[in-house]
Amino acid sequence: MSIVSFSEPGKAKRPYYNEEHLMFQDALRKFLEKEAAPYFEQWEGERFVPRSFWKKLGQNGFLCPAVSEEYGGGGGDFALSLVLSEETARIGAGLVGPGAHSNIIVPYLESFGTEEQKQKYLPGCVSGDIITAIAMTEPGTGSDLASITTTAIKEGDYYIINGQKTFITNGIHADLIIVACKTNLEANPPHKGISLLLVEKDTVGFSRGKKLQKVGMHAQDTAELIFEDVKVPVSNLLGQEGEGFKYLMSKLQQERIMAAFGAQIAAEEMLRMTIQYVKERQAFGKPISKFQNTQFKIAEMATEVQLGRTFLDELIMKHQRGENIVTEVSMAKWWITDMARRISPECMQLHGGYGYMEEYPIARKYRDIAISPIFAGTNEIMKVIISKNLGL
Ligand SMILES: Cc1cc2nc3c(=O)[nH]c(=O)nc-3n(C[C@H](O)[C@H](O)[C@H](O)COP(=O)(O)OP(=O)(O)OC[C@H]3O[C@@H](n4cnc5c(N)ncnc54)[C@H](O)[C@@H]3O)c2cc1C
């Protein structure tokens, strides 16, 4: 079990980090301190992370650490992917794009792609020349994935795609998009009609809609994508026709662990900065950390954060061993993201008026964390899954 350290960021030992992970972490942290931290404010203001930063990440071997070495990747395990998510999250949640690309989207290509698709795309994904996105959500449907209306109708050796997607992470930068489409409109049940298709950015009929203005994660690029008679060869099918829903479900366990992990890191960071602040800030002739209210609030939050860490560490190790832990991961996703969101206003409150000022990082954390109970499957959907698996 790892004990959360609130004194220094990222000092806690993780049971799944070995020497290799710690070396990767150290190198990545130094890289981010030089190449991301000094510019992050600017990126948040511009609401964009420049492509040059992606390239630098790739050139230095930090993208796609789990992709096999034969395609140029690091050939690492899941814990190496966690290091990437952890270190970018410490800079800011707005830097979630490279982690989503490396740890959530590219794994679809590696798991379900043909040898030809892998040869064609994976080296570019690793180098930062190809940025990926996965497009499931539509203006009319998010949680109810089986009801998507984007269609891909086969005509000879091509599929013709029509539809619209929204809220797509990396949508503006994306060079390659995995699009969830209906290839069989008659399928019963409807989710058996879903397939995944690869669409390259320059394909005729593909366009990007608005870059969306979000409450938080300002530097993160999130966009609408439009498909109007987009013609892709049948060789762009990812895996088998009609298996898309199954592929998505199979990868969601990892995506949800990542969502819980990001929220856990955010909770630990919020509490760390709050503990530091209350020790320094004086009121009525003493540090505000000496008021019993402050102490009890922090003691309660530290307990919840430790509970989250303990649960999550166990699930990470089970996931690494390849165990099916859908129910527990759903529990962790809702509970940890909810816990992190719940403690964010408490941490802000303990900062007083300064907590409401942009120059204090707690303000940004408060905004950024609000999304985590919504994406990667809403927390209500997590409870639907848990209830179903309990036989209710
Ligand atoms: C910043 C951001 C990034 C995202 N990135 C991506 C991406 O890269 N790719 C992608 O495809 N999508 C992405 N999404 C979309 C995200 O996954 C969806 O927003 C999410 O799944 C919820 O779908 P929805 O917004 O349509 O809400 P809805 O499904 O309309 O839900 C609205 C409310 O109803 C509740 N609800 C729905 N069904 C039930 C039910 N059965 N029981 C109880 N309550 C229910 C929900 O929990 C929610 O509270 C992103 C979203 C955001 C905001």
Image: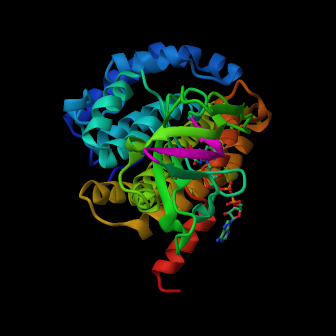
Principal SS element in the magenta part?
strand
Magenta region, residue range: 156-169
**How many numbered marks does the figure carry?**
0
Q: Nearer the viewer, residue 299 or 304?
A: 304
Question: Image quadrant for the N terminus?
Answer: bottom left
Which residue is rendered at x = 35% and y = 21% of the image? 127
Q: Is residue 159 magenta?
A: yes
Q: Nearer the viewer, residue 155 or 261?
A: 155
With respect to residue 131, does 140 lie above or below? below
Q: Is residue 63 magenta?
A: no
Q: Quadrant of ligand 1?
A: bottom right
Residue 83 coordinates in the image, percent (x, y)? 36, 36
With respect to residue 115, does 203 lie above or below? above
In the visual, does 374 lie left or right of 266?
right
With respect to residue 386, does 210 lie above or below? above
Residue 111 coordinates in the image, percent (x, y)? 31, 48
Residue 305 coordinates in the image, percent (x, y)? 51, 53
* Residue farthest to the front, as pictured: 156
